Image (cartoon, rainbow, N blue to C red):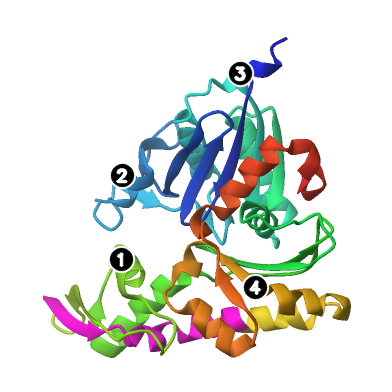
């Protein structure tokens, strides 16, 4: 008689962003996976802020305040901070812990048993009665509307913050897969290194991410545009502003993009011949924040000689997949695990 009052949550617990879907409330969280806490607290982590507010504090606090991303490469690296962040995000759902029933969490295909346990334990501590995991490329494929239970193979590349998950899916299972622990965050780091090595300009993580989103390109066919960037001159220690062409990103991102491309090629090399026709016909779908890099689909089409398209809901694909699984739990039960 009480079954109807219990609440179910779907979570895309990403290195860069966390998105939470509540069964009867829609998307209730879409914020950076960042936590700010006071150092040296006797009761562990005294959370000061999470999400957007915490991210604004990156690189701007004194020693007594730590601002970190508790997740690395798509999994929880700092268990205590990760648990505190998950609890704080779930609180925003306004679901009392005693009413929180089922949680589905997207995880990378290359996750280890220790990493699985860390995520499940965090969700259970936050109040969930039952925790189920789904591989992120599987959730993303469901989220973009692929028939993952059908007889035709689908290929998806989910480029998140910490990992790039590549998978070919058929009959409700992952036929071949590859997890590359390199994705959008590495692009930010590549920009930082490039600016320092080429222009002797030191920029922070937030600046690198901003210019990547606003001006980054992956294909030489993209229109050339100018942009400004401000940082600290490595030689003088003084602030300096540069006016640059967006073509610099072709050099800055080359290592990351080549690594992702080679990982896709390596996955295709493992493809059973019987499924090759499906991939040629259906192509590859890109999801995740990294998929939004301007010209990436064009670059991959040229390199792979296959159709490559960016999902219209690229940022929400995994979270949308958890929503569909929750709404049709029995139908999608073959794709989840514990």
| Residue at position x 62%, y 41% in the image | 323
Percent position of residue 173, x then y: 81, 58
Q: CA distance from mark 1 to mark 3?
A: 40 Å
Q: Secondary structure at mark 4?
A: strand
N-terminal label among 2 and 3: 2
Q: Which mark is residue 284?
A: 4
**What residue is pinned by disc 1?**
210
Query: Which of pointers 2 and 1 lies earlier in the amino acid sequence?
Result: 2
Q: Secondary structure at mark 3?
A: helix
Tag 1 secondary structure: helix
Measured from the top left, where is residue 12 in percent x and y? 56, 48
Q: CA distance from mark 4 to mark 2?
A: 36 Å
Q: In the rendered image, which quarter is residue 105 located in?
A: top right
Disc 2 is placed on an element classified as helix
Q: Is residue 173 visible?
A: yes
**What residue is pinned by disc 3?**
98
The quadrant in which residue 269 appears is: bottom right
């Amino acid at each position: 008689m009480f079954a109807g009052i219990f609440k179910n949550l779907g979570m895309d617990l990403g290195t860069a962003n966390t998105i939470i879907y509540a069964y009867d409330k829609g998307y209730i969280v879409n914020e950076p996976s960042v936590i700010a806490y006071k150092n040296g607290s006797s009761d562990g982590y005294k959370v000061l802020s999470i999400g957007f507010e915490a991210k604004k504090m990156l690189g701007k606090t004194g020693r007594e305040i730590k601002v970190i991303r508790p997740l690395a490469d798509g999994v929880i690296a700092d268990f205590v901070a990760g648990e505190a962040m998950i609890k704080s995000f779930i609180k925003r759902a306004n679901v009392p812990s005693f009413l929180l029933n089922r949680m589905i969490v997207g995880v990378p295909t290359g996750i280890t048993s220790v990493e699985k346990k860390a995520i499940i334990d965090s969700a259970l501590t936050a109040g969930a009665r039952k925790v189920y995991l789904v591989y992120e490329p599987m959730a993303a494929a469901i989220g973009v509307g692929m028939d993952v239970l059908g007889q035709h193979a689908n290929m998806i590349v989910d480029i998140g913050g910490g990992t790039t998950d590549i998978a070919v899916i058929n009959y409700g299972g992952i036929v071949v897969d590859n997890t590359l622990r390199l994705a959008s965050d590495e692009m930010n780091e590549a920009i930082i290194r490039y600016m320092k090595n080429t222009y002797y300009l030191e920029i922070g993580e937030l600046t690198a991410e901003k210019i990547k989103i606003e001006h980054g390109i992956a294909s030489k066919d993209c229109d050339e545009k100018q942009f400004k960037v401000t940082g600290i001159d490595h030689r003088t220690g003084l602030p300096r502003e540069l006016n640059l062409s967006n073509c610099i990103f072709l050099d800055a991102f080359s290592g990351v993009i080549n690594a992702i491309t080679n990982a896709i090629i390596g996955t295709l090399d493992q493809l059973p011949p019987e499924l090759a026709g499906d991939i040629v016909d259906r192509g590859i779908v890109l999801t995740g924040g990294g998929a939004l890099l301007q010209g990436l689909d064009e670059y991959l089409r040229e390199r792979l000689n296959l159709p490559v398209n960016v999902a219209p809901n690229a940022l929400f694909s995994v979270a949308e997949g958890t929503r569909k699984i929750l709404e049709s739990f029995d139908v999608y039960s073959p794709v989840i695990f514990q």
